[in-house]
Amino acid sequence: MREKAGDEIARQRLAREAADTRQRLVAGGLFYVLGWLVVSAPGDAFAEHTVVWTAITLGFLALAGLRFWPRAPDEDEDIGRLKAWIDRQWILVLLTAALWGGVLSWVLFDPHLAGGRSAALLCTIAFATAFAHNYAMRRNRAVLGVALLYLPAPLLLPRTDESLAVGATVAIYSVYLGIVLLRSCREYQQQLDLYDALRMQRDQYEALSRIDPLTGVANRRSFGGALAHHVGEARRSGRPLALLVLDLDHFKRVNDEHGHDAGDACLVRFAERMREMLGVPGAHLSRLGGEEFGVLLPGHDAAAAGALAEQMRASLEQRPLQLREGPLALTVSIGVAVLHPEAGEGGDELYRAADRAMYRAKGEGRNRVRVDGA
Protein backbone atom coordinates (compact mmCIF):
# COMPACT_ATOMS: atom_id res chain seq x y z
CA MET A 1 0.00 0.00 0.00
CA ARG A 2 2.80 2.40 0.91
CA GLU A 3 4.59 1.59 -2.38
CA LYS A 4 1.40 2.32 -4.34
CA ALA A 5 1.02 5.65 -2.55
CA GLY A 6 4.64 6.49 -3.38
CA ASP A 7 4.12 5.57 -7.03
CA GLU A 8 1.03 7.78 -7.20
CA ILE A 9 2.91 10.74 -5.72
CA ALA A 10 5.71 10.22 -8.26
CA ARG A 11 3.17 9.98 -11.07
CA GLN A 12 1.45 13.19 -10.03
CA ARG A 13 4.78 15.03 -9.78
CA LEU A 14 5.60 13.88 -13.30
CA ALA A 15 2.17 15.00 -14.49
CA ARG A 16 2.78 18.43 -13.00
CA GLU A 17 6.23 18.58 -14.61
CA ALA A 18 4.77 17.57 -17.97
CA ALA A 19 2.13 20.32 -17.71
CA ASP A 20 4.77 22.93 -16.82
CA THR A 21 7.04 21.75 -19.62
CA ARG A 22 4.22 21.94 -22.16
CA GLN A 23 3.32 25.45 -21.08
CA ARG A 24 6.90 26.69 -21.40
CA LEU A 25 7.53 25.01 -24.73
CA VAL A 26 4.78 26.72 -26.69
CA ALA A 27 6.50 29.84 -28.00
CA GLY A 28 10.14 29.16 -27.19
CA GLY A 29 11.14 27.52 -30.46
CA LEU A 30 9.95 30.41 -32.61
CA PHE A 31 12.29 32.87 -30.87
CA TYR A 32 15.29 30.85 -32.01
CA VAL A 33 14.07 31.10 -35.60
CA LEU A 34 13.65 34.88 -35.29
CA GLY A 35 17.00 35.18 -33.52
CA TRP A 36 18.78 33.36 -36.34
CA LEU A 37 17.14 35.53 -38.99
CA VAL A 38 18.16 38.70 -37.14
CA VAL A 39 21.74 37.48 -36.64
CA SER A 40 22.23 36.39 -40.25
CA ALA A 41 20.51 39.37 -41.87
CA PRO A 42 23.31 42.02 -41.59
CA GLY A 43 25.95 39.87 -43.31
CA ASP A 44 26.06 37.92 -46.53
CA ALA A 45 25.62 34.49 -44.94
CA PHE A 46 22.78 33.57 -47.24
CA ALA A 47 24.72 34.47 -50.36
CA GLU A 48 28.01 32.90 -49.24
CA HIS A 49 26.62 29.83 -47.47
CA THR A 50 23.18 29.25 -48.96
CA VAL A 51 22.99 25.53 -48.16
CA VAL A 52 24.16 25.95 -44.55
CA TRP A 53 21.90 28.96 -43.98
CA THR A 54 18.92 27.02 -45.33
CA ALA A 55 19.77 23.95 -43.26
CA ILE A 56 20.01 25.99 -40.06
CA THR A 57 16.74 27.79 -40.78
CA LEU A 58 14.94 24.55 -41.51
CA GLY A 59 16.51 22.97 -38.42
CA PHE A 60 15.19 25.68 -36.12
CA LEU A 61 11.76 25.53 -37.80
CA ALA A 62 11.59 21.74 -37.49
CA LEU A 63 12.62 21.79 -33.82
CA ALA A 64 10.04 24.51 -33.14
CA GLY A 65 7.30 22.55 -34.88
CA LEU A 66 8.10 19.28 -33.12
CA ARG A 67 7.39 20.93 -29.77
CA PHE A 68 3.70 20.74 -30.63
CA TRP A 69 3.67 17.01 -31.48
CA PRO A 70 2.64 14.68 -30.02
CA ARG A 71 0.24 16.39 -27.68
CA ALA A 72 1.02 16.59 -23.99
CA PRO A 73 -0.17 13.53 -22.00
CA ASP A 74 -3.22 13.80 -19.79
CA GLU A 75 -2.84 14.16 -16.03
CA ASP A 76 -4.03 10.60 -15.45
CA GLU A 77 -1.48 8.99 -17.80
CA ASP A 78 0.82 6.30 -16.39
CA ILE A 79 4.40 7.02 -15.32
CA GLY A 80 5.93 5.41 -18.41
CA ARG A 81 4.09 7.66 -20.88
CA LEU A 82 4.78 10.76 -18.80
CA LYS A 83 8.50 10.00 -18.62
CA ALA A 84 8.72 9.24 -22.34
CA TRP A 85 6.99 12.50 -23.28
CA ILE A 86 9.13 14.61 -20.92
CA ASP A 87 12.34 12.96 -22.19
CA ARG A 88 11.33 13.63 -25.78
CA GLN A 89 10.73 17.32 -25.07
CA TRP A 90 14.10 17.59 -23.37
CA ILE A 91 15.76 16.11 -26.45
CA LEU A 92 14.14 18.82 -28.58
CA VAL A 93 15.13 21.57 -26.15
CA LEU A 94 18.73 20.39 -25.89
CA LEU A 95 19.04 19.97 -29.66
CA THR A 96 17.79 23.54 -30.09
CA ALA A 97 20.33 24.78 -27.54
CA ALA A 98 23.12 22.86 -29.28
CA LEU A 99 22.12 24.26 -32.67
CA TRP A 100 22.16 27.81 -31.32
CA GLY A 101 25.54 27.18 -29.69
CA GLY A 102 26.83 26.08 -33.09
CA VAL A 103 25.35 29.20 -34.71
CA LEU A 104 27.03 31.40 -32.09
CA SER A 105 30.37 29.70 -32.67
CA TRP A 106 30.03 30.22 -36.42
CA VAL A 107 29.11 33.89 -36.01
CA LEU A 108 32.11 34.54 -33.76
CA PHE A 109 34.53 33.00 -36.26
CA ASP A 110 33.12 33.81 -39.69
CA PRO A 111 33.86 37.37 -40.91
CA HIS A 112 30.85 37.16 -43.23
CA LEU A 113 28.67 37.20 -40.10
CA ALA A 114 30.61 39.84 -38.16
CA GLY A 115 27.74 42.29 -38.59
CA GLY A 116 25.47 40.02 -36.58
CA ARG A 117 27.92 39.34 -33.75
CA SER A 118 26.39 41.83 -31.31
CA ALA A 119 22.89 40.55 -32.05
CA ALA A 120 24.11 36.97 -31.55
CA LEU A 121 25.58 37.80 -28.15
CA LEU A 122 22.39 39.60 -27.06
CA CYS A 123 20.21 36.72 -28.24
CA THR A 124 22.48 34.23 -26.48
CA ILE A 125 22.24 36.10 -23.18
CA ALA A 126 18.45 36.30 -23.54
CA PHE A 127 18.07 32.62 -24.50
CA ALA A 128 20.36 31.38 -21.72
CA THR A 129 18.60 33.52 -19.11
CA ALA A 130 15.17 32.31 -20.25
CA PHE A 131 16.44 28.71 -20.22
CA ALA A 132 17.72 29.07 -16.65
CA HIS A 133 14.35 30.39 -15.50
CA ASN A 134 11.99 28.19 -17.52
CA TYR A 135 13.68 24.79 -17.68
CA ALA A 136 14.72 24.30 -14.08
CA MET A 137 12.66 21.10 -13.72
CA ARG A 138 15.75 18.88 -14.10
CA ARG A 139 18.96 20.43 -12.78
CA ASN A 140 21.52 18.38 -14.72
CA ARG A 141 19.65 18.76 -18.00
CA ALA A 142 19.16 22.47 -17.38
CA VAL A 143 22.88 22.93 -16.72
CA LEU A 144 23.66 21.10 -19.97
CA GLY A 145 21.20 23.25 -21.92
CA VAL A 146 22.61 26.53 -20.59
CA ALA A 147 26.14 25.32 -21.28
CA LEU A 148 25.29 24.42 -24.88
CA LEU A 149 23.74 27.84 -25.40
CA TYR A 150 26.16 30.08 -23.58
CA LEU A 151 29.61 28.50 -23.21
CA PRO A 152 30.77 29.28 -26.78
CA ALA A 153 30.58 33.00 -25.91
CA PRO A 154 33.11 33.18 -23.02
CA LEU A 155 35.29 30.47 -24.58
CA LEU A 156 35.54 31.94 -28.09
CA LEU A 157 35.26 35.72 -27.57
CA PRO A 158 38.94 36.04 -26.50
CA ARG A 159 39.90 34.71 -29.97
CA THR A 160 37.93 37.41 -31.77
CA ASP A 161 38.61 41.11 -32.18
CA GLU A 162 35.96 42.04 -29.61
CA SER A 163 37.17 44.25 -26.78
CA LEU A 164 38.36 42.84 -23.48
CA ALA A 165 35.44 44.56 -21.74
CA VAL A 166 32.92 42.59 -23.80
CA GLY A 167 34.67 39.30 -23.08
CA ALA A 168 34.89 40.07 -19.34
CA THR A 169 31.21 41.03 -19.22
CA VAL A 170 30.15 37.81 -20.91
CA ALA A 171 32.36 35.77 -18.56
CA ILE A 172 30.98 37.49 -15.46
CA TYR A 173 27.41 36.96 -16.67
CA SER A 174 28.05 33.23 -16.88
CA VAL A 175 28.53 33.21 -13.10
CA TYR A 176 25.19 34.97 -12.69
CA LEU A 177 23.56 32.39 -14.97
CA GLY A 178 24.88 29.56 -12.81
CA ILE A 179 23.48 31.16 -9.66
CA VAL A 180 20.11 31.84 -11.27
CA LEU A 181 19.91 28.31 -12.62
CA LEU A 182 20.62 26.63 -9.28
CA ARG A 183 18.16 28.90 -7.49
CA SER A 184 15.46 28.23 -10.10
CA CYS A 185 15.97 24.46 -9.76
CA ARG A 186 15.66 24.66 -5.99
CA GLU A 187 12.55 26.85 -6.17
CA TYR A 188 10.90 24.53 -8.67
CA GLN A 189 11.42 21.50 -6.42
CA GLN A 190 10.01 23.51 -3.52
CA GLN A 191 6.95 24.31 -5.65
CA LEU A 192 6.48 20.60 -6.36
CA ASP A 193 6.81 19.80 -2.65
CA LEU A 194 4.23 22.47 -1.82
CA TYR A 195 1.92 21.11 -4.52
CA ASP A 196 2.25 17.61 -3.05
CA ALA A 197 1.51 18.88 0.45
CA LEU A 198 -1.58 20.81 -0.71
CA ARG A 199 -2.83 17.85 -2.73
CA MET A 200 -2.38 15.47 0.20
CA GLN A 201 -4.17 17.93 2.48
CA ARG A 202 -7.01 18.22 -0.03
CA ASP A 203 -7.28 14.43 -0.29
CA GLN A 204 -7.33 14.12 3.50
CA TYR A 205 -10.11 16.71 3.78
CA GLU A 206 -12.02 14.96 1.01
CA ALA A 207 -11.68 11.62 2.79
CA LEU A 208 -12.72 13.12 6.14
CA SER A 209 -15.75 14.74 4.54
CA ARG A 210 -16.99 11.24 3.59
CA ILE A 211 -16.45 9.55 6.98
CA ASP A 212 -18.78 9.59 9.95
CA PRO A 213 -16.64 11.07 12.74
CA LEU A 214 -18.25 8.96 15.48
CA THR A 215 -18.24 5.45 14.04
CA GLY A 216 -15.51 5.75 11.43
CA VAL A 217 -17.69 4.25 8.67
CA ALA A 218 -18.84 6.11 5.57
CA ASN A 219 -21.34 8.93 6.08
CA ARG A 220 -24.55 9.83 4.24
CA ARG A 221 -22.66 11.82 1.59
CA SER A 222 -20.39 8.88 0.83
CA PHE A 223 -23.41 6.57 0.74
CA GLY A 224 -25.06 8.74 -1.91
CA GLY A 225 -21.99 8.59 -4.15
CA ALA A 226 -21.54 4.84 -3.65
CA LEU A 227 -25.24 4.21 -4.35
CA ALA A 228 -25.10 6.11 -7.64
CA HIS A 229 -21.90 4.30 -8.65
CA HIS A 230 -23.20 0.82 -7.88
CA VAL A 231 -26.54 1.48 -9.55
CA GLY A 232 -24.68 2.46 -12.71
CA GLU A 233 -22.50 -0.66 -12.50
CA ALA A 234 -25.54 -2.87 -11.97
CA ARG A 235 -27.24 -1.43 -15.06
CA ARG A 236 -24.14 -1.94 -17.20
CA SER A 237 -23.26 -5.44 -15.98
CA GLY A 238 -26.75 -6.80 -15.35
CA ARG A 239 -25.66 -8.06 -11.93
CA PRO A 240 -28.04 -7.59 -8.98
CA LEU A 241 -27.58 -4.92 -6.33
CA ALA A 242 -29.07 -5.22 -2.86
CA LEU A 243 -29.44 -2.62 -0.13
CA LEU A 244 -29.92 -3.22 3.60
CA VAL A 245 -31.28 -0.49 5.84
CA LEU A 246 -30.63 -1.25 9.52
CA ASP A 247 -32.22 0.60 12.43
CA LEU A 248 -31.46 -0.17 16.08
CA ASP A 249 -34.57 -0.97 18.11
CA HIS A 250 -35.56 1.27 21.02
CA PHE A 251 -32.30 3.18 20.80
CA LYS A 252 -33.81 6.17 22.60
CA ARG A 253 -33.95 4.04 25.76
CA VAL A 254 -30.18 3.62 25.63
CA ASN A 255 -29.68 7.38 25.71
CA ASP A 256 -32.36 7.89 28.35
CA GLU A 257 -31.21 5.10 30.68
CA HIS A 258 -27.42 5.11 30.18
CA GLY A 259 -26.65 8.59 28.86
CA HIS A 260 -25.56 9.90 25.50
CA ASP A 261 -21.95 8.78 25.99
CA ALA A 262 -23.15 5.22 26.28
CA GLY A 263 -25.37 5.76 23.25
CA ASP A 264 -22.38 6.95 21.22
CA ALA A 265 -20.32 3.98 22.40
CA CYS A 266 -23.16 1.70 21.41
CA LEU A 267 -23.18 3.07 17.87
CA VAL A 268 -19.42 2.63 17.62
CA ARG A 269 -19.59 -1.01 18.81
CA PHE A 270 -22.50 -1.73 16.49
CA ALA A 271 -20.59 -0.36 13.49
CA GLU A 272 -17.59 -2.50 14.45
CA ARG A 273 -19.79 -5.60 14.71
CA MET A 274 -21.35 -4.97 11.32
CA ARG A 275 -17.92 -4.51 9.73
CA GLU A 276 -16.87 -7.85 11.19
CA MET A 277 -19.90 -9.48 9.58
CA LEU A 278 -19.35 -7.92 6.15
CA GLY A 279 -16.63 -10.08 4.68
CA VAL A 280 -18.15 -9.42 1.28
CA PRO A 281 -16.18 -7.94 -1.66
CA GLY A 282 -17.49 -4.50 -2.56
CA ALA A 283 -19.82 -4.19 0.46
CA HIS A 284 -20.29 -0.55 1.52
CA LEU A 285 -21.34 0.20 5.12
CA SER A 286 -22.56 3.72 5.90
CA ARG A 287 -24.17 5.53 8.78
CA LEU A 288 -27.22 7.22 7.32
CA GLY A 289 -28.05 9.23 10.41
CA GLY A 290 -28.83 8.67 14.06
CA GLU A 291 -29.09 4.93 14.71
CA GLU A 292 -29.76 4.07 11.05
CA PHE A 293 -27.16 2.36 8.85
CA GLY A 294 -27.08 1.23 5.23
CA VAL A 295 -25.22 -1.60 3.51
CA LEU A 296 -24.81 -1.82 -0.27
CA LEU A 297 -24.23 -5.39 -1.52
CA PRO A 298 -23.19 -5.58 -5.20
CA GLY A 299 -23.87 -8.95 -6.79
CA HIS A 300 -26.41 -10.03 -4.13
CA ASP A 301 -29.94 -11.06 -4.97
CA ALA A 302 -32.82 -10.98 -2.49
CA ALA A 303 -32.08 -14.45 -1.07
CA ALA A 304 -28.35 -13.81 -0.50
CA ALA A 305 -28.93 -10.33 0.92
CA GLY A 306 -31.72 -11.59 3.20
CA ALA A 307 -29.52 -14.42 4.51
CA LEU A 308 -26.69 -12.00 5.33
CA ALA A 309 -29.13 -9.60 7.00
CA GLU A 310 -30.44 -12.46 9.16
CA GLN A 311 -26.89 -13.31 10.24
CA MET A 312 -26.33 -9.69 11.25
CA ARG A 313 -29.60 -9.59 13.17
CA ALA A 314 -28.91 -12.88 14.96
CA SER A 315 -25.37 -11.84 15.88
CA LEU A 316 -26.63 -8.74 17.65
CA GLU A 317 -29.38 -10.67 19.43
CA GLN A 318 -27.10 -13.49 20.60
CA ARG A 319 -24.00 -11.46 21.47
CA PRO A 320 -24.68 -8.22 23.39
CA LEU A 321 -22.49 -5.23 22.67
CA GLN A 322 -19.66 -4.77 25.15
CA LEU A 323 -19.61 -1.27 26.60
CA ARG A 324 -17.59 0.22 29.44
CA GLU A 325 -20.65 -0.07 31.65
CA GLY A 326 -20.99 -3.75 30.76
CA PRO A 327 -22.82 -5.83 28.11
CA LEU A 328 -25.80 -4.17 26.45
CA ALA A 329 -28.53 -6.32 24.88
CA LEU A 330 -29.82 -4.69 21.74
CA THR A 331 -31.73 -5.73 18.63
CA VAL A 332 -31.97 -4.39 15.09
CA SER A 333 -34.66 -4.26 12.43
CA ILE A 334 -33.45 -4.68 8.85
CA GLY A 335 -35.12 -3.93 5.54
CA VAL A 336 -33.82 -5.52 2.33
CA ALA A 337 -34.44 -4.42 -1.25
CA VAL A 338 -32.97 -5.38 -4.62
CA LEU A 339 -32.59 -3.08 -7.60
CA HIS A 340 -34.76 -3.78 -10.64
CA PRO A 341 -33.16 -1.68 -13.42
CA GLU A 342 -35.36 -3.29 -16.08
CA ALA A 343 -38.31 -1.59 -14.40
CA GLY A 344 -36.56 1.79 -14.59
CA GLU A 345 -35.61 1.84 -10.91
CA GLY A 346 -32.73 3.99 -9.70
CA GLY A 347 -30.97 4.68 -6.44
CA ASP A 348 -33.83 6.64 -4.91
CA GLU A 349 -36.33 3.85 -5.58
CA LEU A 350 -33.94 1.26 -4.16
CA TYR A 351 -33.44 3.24 -0.97
CA ARG A 352 -37.18 3.86 -0.52
CA ALA A 353 -37.91 0.15 -1.00
CA ALA A 354 -35.32 -0.90 1.62
CA ASP A 355 -36.50 1.81 4.01
CA ARG A 356 -40.11 0.69 3.52
CA ALA A 357 -39.12 -2.91 4.30
CA MET A 358 -37.29 -1.77 7.43
CA TYR A 359 -40.38 0.06 8.70
CA ARG A 360 -42.43 -3.06 8.00
CA ALA A 361 -40.00 -5.00 10.21
CA LYS A 362 -40.51 -2.36 12.90
CA GLY A 363 -44.26 -2.52 12.58
CA GLU A 364 -44.33 -6.31 12.85
CA GLY A 365 -42.58 -6.35 16.19
CA ARG A 366 -38.93 -5.32 15.54
CA ASN A 367 -35.85 -7.56 15.73
CA ARG A 368 -36.51 -9.09 12.32
CA VAL A 369 -35.60 -8.94 8.65
CA ARG A 370 -38.07 -8.08 5.95
CA VAL A 371 -37.46 -8.15 2.20
CA ASP A 372 -39.32 -5.64 0.06
CA GLY A 373 -41.89 -7.31 -2.16
CA ALA A 374 -41.55 -10.72 -0.42
Image: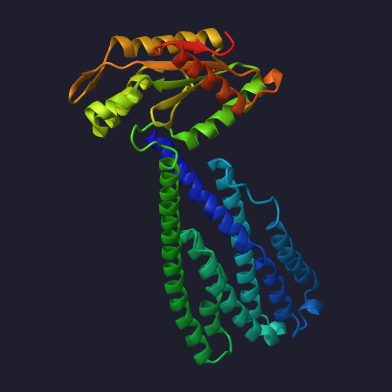
* Left or right of 194 in this view: 31: right
Q: Give the quarter of the figure containing the C terminus.
A: top right
Q: Is residue 10 left or right of residue 253?
A: right
| Foreground of the two, 339 or 52 | 339
The quadrant of the image that shows the N terminus is top left
Q: How many marks?
A: 0
Compared with residue 32, is residue 88 higher up or lower down, i.e. above or below? above
Pick whichever, 15 or 197, lies toward us.
197
Residue 263's x, y, as percent? 28, 29
295 versus 86 height, above or below: above
Vertically, is 38 above or below 332?
below
Residue drawn 43% across the image and 41% down it: 207
Task: Please say whether residue 353 is visible from this viewpoint.
Answer: yes
| Residue 242 image offset from top left, x and y in percent | 54, 18
- Give above or below for 177 relative to 198: below
**Residue lying at 42% horizontally and 73% vertically, measured from the top left:** 179
Taking depth in this image into account, of 253 and 152 the one nearest to the observer is 253
Instruction: Please provide percent x and percent y for residue 45.
Output: 76, 79
Is residue 280 rendered to the left or right of residue 340?
Answer: left
Color theme of the render:
rainbow
Return the residue nearer the eye: 296 or 167: 296
Instruction: Please give the name of the residue rendered at 59% of the width and 11% of the height, measured from the top-left corner.
Output: 373
